[in-house]
Amino acid sequence: MYMTDLLSCVSDSCTHAARARALTHGGTPPSRCSARRLSSISTPTSRRTTSTGARAPSSSSSSTSAPTSPSPSSPAASKTYPKLVGLTKLSPFKNPKAPVFPRLAQGKTHDEMAVTWTSGYDVGEAYPFVEWGMVTSGSGGGNPARTPAGTLTFNRGSMCGAPARTIGWRDPGFIHTAFMRGLWPNKEYFYKVGHELPDGTVVWGKPYTFRAPPTPGQSSLQRVIVFGDMGKAERDGSNEYANYQPGSLNTTDALVKDLDNFDMVFHIGDLPYANGYISQWDQFTAQVAPISARKPYMIASGNHERDWPNTGGFFDVEDSGGECGVLAETMYYYPAENRANFWYKVDYGMFRFCVADSEHDWREGTPQYKFIEECLSTVDRKHQPWLVFAAHRVLGYSSNKWYAEQGSFEEPKGRESLQKLWQRHRVDLAIFGHVHNYERTCPLYQNQCVSNERSRYSGTMNGTIFVVAGGGGSHLNGYTSAVPKWSVFRDRDYGFTKLTAFNHSSLLFEYKRSSDGEVYDNFTIHRDYRDVLGCVHDSCFPTTLAT
């Protein structure tokens, strides 16, 4: 039995999905011919190779006949094909199985940090672990502890379709995750991952440090980066999948440069845009490793990670290239109760983040709606005043061109079930990706601005501010020519957002362009706990006349 067999829709087991096949603009590029299919574009069709390396016969010849060169008069003969001009010396890896690309993530509790990494070692070959300890003054490090890691992998049969299970397949090696628990808040820790061989020697990864998260409610300076849709690109300037993610290196470099000035990252969907070409995940994890090895790198599920027909998702489209969520769910750790359900909460000091999965049904009556309601309703706002909702697709508001053409200014069926929850629980910010630009709204409820203020909010917030932060690096999208009244700021450029909580009463929001790291939009919120409790439309607590 393969993964596709487990996920296939059968009678009485299908989710009540929207099946919005034609409504996934911003998904897979129009051309289905991948620039990665080098074997099929660098040689004539009659001599192309299969994913196993064998030559595939042309459609006009039998399986036993030898391939022939095109005649001078044939169309193929007029094409120019790459020619071998030279060979470099072999550059072997010292150890191709060595552990690489560590990826931190906050665990299910504030005093737990997970580290995930990739290696070529199965557990039968070498034992994976992380060695870690608190950084102490003077010596640099105390007595290290060793924590064993779990090991996962997947095979071609885990993929749901092509190209992931055909020409895009590549053995991923092994993915290891270990947990460092009992961390002291805000203390600095050192760590390095390793594999102990049968003879007792250890193959080590590089050493790194990180700072433990604050306790929920702790008042200290807390800074969080949020963006979506970054992808990866080539450092040598060569073409990357039709130049689909031209801004990704700018965003990566801007964050690496500013590494000491933020504490956590939320990448809310569309990570490498691998689209079924498995090796692209290694390229992406290598690109962001300078960030993810030092800061918790939390992710959300996007259409390019999850969507594939008949696999239980909300959108029956092919945007994942057959990955159907397997890569994202295995390559990164996130503190979900069920890794196949990509929704979870994170308590980080004065913040609570409720991360939803826009590729599964979020409407009222679904398991995800129950999670969202519980996440929003269980936060203690006197200690964690800053409540943030995040998802990949725009479940709120966007004046992106294709949404405007549909007349919805949102993902179809996006906010209808959720806006009362956001209002009832006084969500401060809802941040989305999917649309490749930046946009911020006024505080909104039911399509109406509930404040005329644009940059300095104070007192009771009568609605939620919606942000599109999908300009992480992929090709940019345009807007409708008519600017809606609720749209406060729009920028068609690459960038990311930053939230800074100074204390329980003051929050700063900034949007920065990746090209120069400068702030192009910002606002502040100043309020007290009584303002959070204040009665606003559709969120007033019932009262009694009894005394």
Image (cartoon, rainbow, N blue to C red):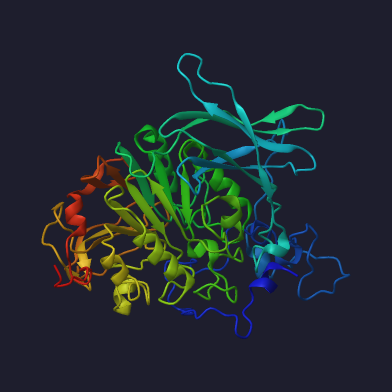
State the image quarter where residue 143 is shown: top right
Q: Is residue 489 above or below residue 282?
A: below
Residue sitting at x 45%, y 78%: 22
Whether 485 is drawn above or below 506: the answer is: below
- Outermost residue to the right: 64
Looking at the rendering, which quadrant does residue 408 occupy? bottom left
**In the rendered view, does 117 fall on the left or right side of 221?**
right
Q: How many marks?
A: 0
Between 64 and 186, the residue placed more toward the observer is 186
Using the image as rendered, state which of residue 281 and residue 105 is in the foreground: 105
**In the rendered image, which quarter contains the N terminus?**
bottom right
Q: Position of residue 539 (x, y in %)?
A: 23, 68
Q: Image check: 357 left or right of 450?
A: right
Which is more toward the observer, 105 or 99?
Answer: 105
Residue 520: image location, x then y, percent: 23, 47
Asked if one can make out residue 247 in the rendered structure from this viewpoint, the answer is: no
Is 514 situated above or below 543?
Answer: above
The residue drawn where x is 43% and y is 30% is: 187
Q: Quadrant of the C terminus?
A: bottom left
Q: Is residue 238 visible?
A: yes
